[in-house]
Image: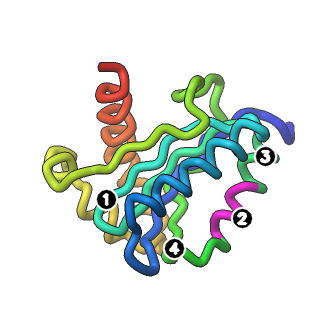
Amino acid sequence: MPNDLICLVYASHATGPISQEDLDEILRVSRENNAQLGITGVLLYSNGNFFQVLEGPKDNVLKLFGRIRKDPRHTGVVTYSCRTIEKRNFPKWTMGFRRITDDDTQAIEGWNHLMQNDGTDAKELADCSHIILALINSFKMVANR
């Protein structure tokens, strides 16, 4: 069905320096747009790398992701997962955010492998699923404190 709930997870690399003001603006616009589209999720940022989880009605998520892929502020967009879900992981967040520190990434086994994956090898993408799960769970634990 076209409006099943889906969860889409991707990573990308900034094309240039990203300031705190840039991140604030990205979040402001994302939260406004996502609220209108019924989309929830989180954005993680670490040393020029973006990692985002989008969840919501399939048509809306795919349309938004099409726009995201064309955004000139980032490149190397790699989709790690796009699947139907029964319920949202982040139902109250039009866009949660966390800046990931080097200490955070060191605690997640396989982080460097995840961020170096160029998305061309389907088996390697599948092998990254445990890293994605660890990342999402670590974010949820921090957010629920």
Magenta stretch: helix, strand or loop mostly: helix
**In the image, residue 67 lies in the stretch drawn in magenta:** yes
Disc nearer the start of the sequence (2/4): 2
**What is the distance, in whole Å, between disc 2 and disc 3 at their CAs?**
11 Å
Give 53 or 95, whichever is nearer the viewer: 95
**Label 2 sits on what residue type?**
Arg
Lower sequence index among marks 3 and 4:
3
What residue range appears in magenta? 64-69
Which residue is denoted by mark 1 in the rendering? 46
Q: Quadrant of the N terminus?
A: top right
Residue 92 horizontal side relative to residue 67, left or right: left
Q: Can you tell which of label 1 and label 3 is closer to the viewer?
A: 1
Task: Tell me whether the residue at label 2 lies in contact with that at label 4, contact meaning CB atoms closer than 8 angstroms.
Answer: no
Query: Could you classify mark 3 by the number of other residues whose Cα lies within 10 Å: few (under 14), some (14-19), or many (20 or more)?
Result: many
Mark 2 to mark 4: distance in Å? Answer: 12 Å
Q: Which residue is mark 2?
A: 67
Task: Write down the residue under mark 3.
Answer: 60
Q: Residue 74 has which mark? A: 4
Residue 25 position, x and y percent, is 55, 56
SS at badge 2: helix
Callouts 3 and 4 close, C-beta under 8 Å:
no
Amino acid type for the residue under numbered disc 1 = Ser
Amino acid at the residue labelled 3: Asn
Separation of marks 1 and 3 at Cα, in angstroms? 26 Å
Q: CA distance from mark 4 to mark 1?
A: 13 Å
- Residue 126 found in image quarter: bottom left
Task: Please tell me which of labels 1 and 3 falls first in the chain.
Answer: 1
Depth order, front residue of 101/25: 25
* N-terminal-most mark, 4 or 1: 1
The relative height of residue 86 versus residue 84 in the rendered view (above or below) is above
